[in-house]
Each structure stands twice: as structure tokens, then as C-alpha cells.
Image (cartoon, helix red, strand yellow):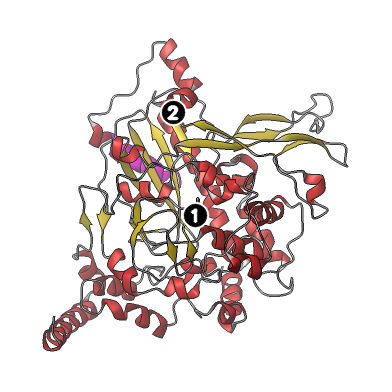
Amino acid sequence: MNRREFLKVAGVTTAATGAALAVNPKKVMASVELGKHQDDYPYEVTKDFKGFSSKNVMFMRMFWDKKRYKDEYINSTYDYHTPIETGIHFYAGMKGYVPLTAHDPNKEGFRPVDVALSTAADSVNMDFGGMSKFTCANPTLQTYPINPKTGEAMKDMPVLTQGLFTWDNSSVDMRVKQGVEPYKFKDAKDAAKYVKKAAKFMGADLVGIAPYNERTKRWTYTEWTNPNVKEFNMPDGSKTFSPVNPIKLKKGEFETYGVTTRESDFMREAGFEPKSIIVMAFKQDYDAMKTAPTAVSRGATSMAYSQMAETAYKVAKFLKEMGYKAAQCGNDTAVSVPLAIEAGLGEGSRMGMVVTEQFGPSVRLAKVYTNLEIHPDKPKTFGVKEFCDVCMKCADACPGKSISKEPITVVKEGMEFDTGKVGKSNISGVEKWFVNGERCLSFWNYNDGGCTTCVAVCPYNKIDEWHHDLSKLMTLTPFKPLLRSFDEWFGYGGPVEPEVRLESKYLKDAVNDFWDKL
């Protein structure tokens, strides 16, 4: 397109769009179809793709990988030298074994009240979800039996029991033995209607269905992994199972015991072979996310994790009550972002998150596998790939320097990018933008356990107002490259420079606005 054609199209588009939006913006946006359904996965997956083991997820490497980073940026910036060093600080802070000391506790966003918000928001997931957050499939939950005479917890008798992400289908097996037939839907489309409504009723903000077939099976982790644990006698007289020595951890030392992997197998562990995958997205609080990378924004993510655990459990229970087997999952079992794309919830992005039309990248994902045949959705594209090609705002704002500015490509282990080298925590053989997970988690730990700055500054992360819709409409015009500038002119996302952002009035005001808005 030459300059004259550009100006002509831009002028006509702007005039027509402006006039229509001035009269009835919502009506205009309701009539515009931004997305296009795809018959295949919208990114290249090469024959070199061999799947991915959960053992190599950064959250799991903290329990076994003692190999020194070759990335001198991590070594010199954070003084972490191995994945274990990086991860154990994160784990210790989350479990309350060590105090969080990265920031002034009197500073907005990092005060005790801010940290308490994050911890409380995550409590359902942490207390009842097991280690799904660390990618453990079918995880157990440690608890203590109650003494029937005193009503007190018997702290010297730790037991492992079922949590919200545990795959117990014994109730369905009992129904079969009793001769109770599964509920019969009219067809797979009828099943989709009821399942989606039930999932939204029980807390999901977005719901999509992916088939469980050869294409989607590849996103299941080739191996499911659990950290090895040991039993410890604690100073208060209690006993506990832990993948990390908690006594040494409180002294600033660390000791881990490796992991155990097993081949992924739904039939062995859940008692069925899946037919469908229900993928759910949970939006994160907009006002809290604006405060990234503070503890308040971590609270938004934590809240979504707790909602994931609760809703996934309820959806699985809904299916079981109708005679179908189910396996509810959070971060575990399979790679969530490709499944969300397969289920039509959004597109991949430069930051590695799925970007949805409704909430941008500000969502967390859970999934439920089931042997109920449900009519699947198709992948949907609406311009995110083209937008991420030119925006790069998340890469500029990333305080860990982990998001690459280089073009999307088929990423393979050993490749070099401007933010480091592709390592074992990156899926190889798939078209995507490179994100250095080792750097990302290193900053999380340096920042006392969270970040989400990339989500907060993304131009797709806006509240649902007409000018947000206008921005989405502009992705169809030659103005697309200017969207980041428009975003910043209107003050969305706050300062991009990491050092400036942390000390900015914007961040202080965002934290106070969050607490002031009832």
C-alpha cells in the first residue's frame, strides 16, 4: 500500500468509524466480527516436536536441577546460579518459611496488608489444591487427622489425602455397579450447551471445548512429575512431609530430594480415556493488575488460582453426577496455553500468554478432561499475532529482560535470542515468540514471588469500554502499528521502563485506588 492509498483508507476508516461510534458505539462493535475461525492450529508445529515433560517446567526444576545457569545476566543480576537456588526462594516465601524482604514494608504495594491480600487470595489453591500450581498432575494434599476425643489436629500424624485437583472417579464406578446409566444428551452440541453454562455458573469467565485427539494429545505432558518428599520432625513437635528441608530452609540453607516422573496415562490414573477437554479462563481483577509488579497484582493472580481450583473441582463433580468421568487440572497435566488456543479462547502472544478478546492476557487457565463427547470449538484468530509483531510493549516493560523482541519463529533448543538461549524449559519445534523462563522466574524471586508487568502494560488489557472496542476495531485498519502509542497517550498500563515503574507515582496511585474503590 502506497502513501496515498494509506491516507485514503485511513481517512475513510476514521471518518466512518468515528461517526458510527459517536452515534452508538456498542451497536457498531456488536456488528463487527473481529475473529476468524481456523480449521487447524494457527501456529506451525514441526515434525521435530516431541512433546514436553513437566519435569522441565521451571516450577519443577526447582526441586532437582543443580546445573549452573550459563546466562550471566541471571548470575550477575540476581545472584541465583541454579534453578534450585532460584526456585527455593520462591517456594520458601510462598510457604511462609522465610520473610519477604525484597521491598520496604512501608511502601505501597508491599505493605503487610498488601502481602496478606495475596496470601489470602491464594489460600484455597494452596491449602486445598495440592501442588497443581507446580505442575503436579493428580496431586495429593497433606493434612492431619482430628483426635475424636479432643477435637485437635494430630500434628504428629501427617497423611496424604485427596485435594481439589485429585482425580477420584470412584463415584462414577459405583454408579456403573449399581446399573445407573449416564445422562443422555441429545447430541454433542447439546452437551456443549449444558457444560458451558454449568462451567460459567460455577465461576469460569470463559469456556471453550477442545477435542481430545491426536492433535491435542501432543499438548499433554509426556511425563507427569512429582517432587520426592521426606518426613521431618519440626521444632514444635509436629511432623511434616516436604520436598525441601524446612528446618534448613529457615536458616537460609536448602536441600531438595529430586523428582519422580511417570509416563502420562489417563486410564491408569483417572480410569478413563478422554474424549473432550473443557478449557476455562478466569479473569484477573483489572484494578489490582494495574499495580504490577506489587503484591496487590500478585493477589489478582492468586485469586484466579483459587477460583481455578474451586471451579474445576465443581465442573468435574457436575460431570460425575451425570455418570461421566473427569480429571480436573490447573497448571498440571498439559500445557494450558495451546489448549486454550485449540478451544477458541484466544491467540498466543509475544509474552507467552494467551490473549482473549474479552480480557486480553489477564486470565488464568484451568481444564477438565472427560469421557463425555462434547462438540468442540475451533481456534480463532483476531489479529493478535500481527499486533504483537509491531507492539513490543511487554518486552520493553519486562523487568527480568525475558521477553524477546525478535520475530515469531519455530523455536528450537540451543537457538540464541536477544534475551538468552533456548533451554530445557522451552517447548521446542513450535512457532512462537521466545520467552526466557529462567530469567522470568529469577525476577519473580527477586521481587518476592510475582510480577505480571507484561500483562498490566499490554494494550489488550483494558476494561470493557467503547474506546477499548475501538482499539480492537483498529486492528483491522492500517493504524494497527500506532495502537501502542494510542495506548500510552491515554495513560494505559503506566510507565514502561522497569526502574521508573517501581518508583512511580502511577504505581503508588494504582495501589491506593485499588484499596479506595469499594
Question: In the image, 321: left or right of 56?
Answer: left
> Which residue range is magenta in the image?
191-204
Q: Residue at x 66, y 51 (%)?
A: 84
Tell me the residue that label 1 is attached to: 423
* Amino acid tagged 1: Gly
Question: In the image, 448: left or right of 461?
Answer: right
Q: Residue at x 32, y 37 (%)?
A: 194
Quarter residue 374 falls in: top left
x%, y% of residue 291? Answer: 56, 71
x%, y% of residue 508? Answer: 61, 78
Q: Is residue 104 above or below residue 43?
A: below
* Amino acid tagged 2: Phe
| Element at label 2 | helix
Q: In front: 100, or 439?
A: 439
x%, y% of residue 499? Answer: 59, 79
**Number of the label disc, if any, that sits on residue 266:** 2
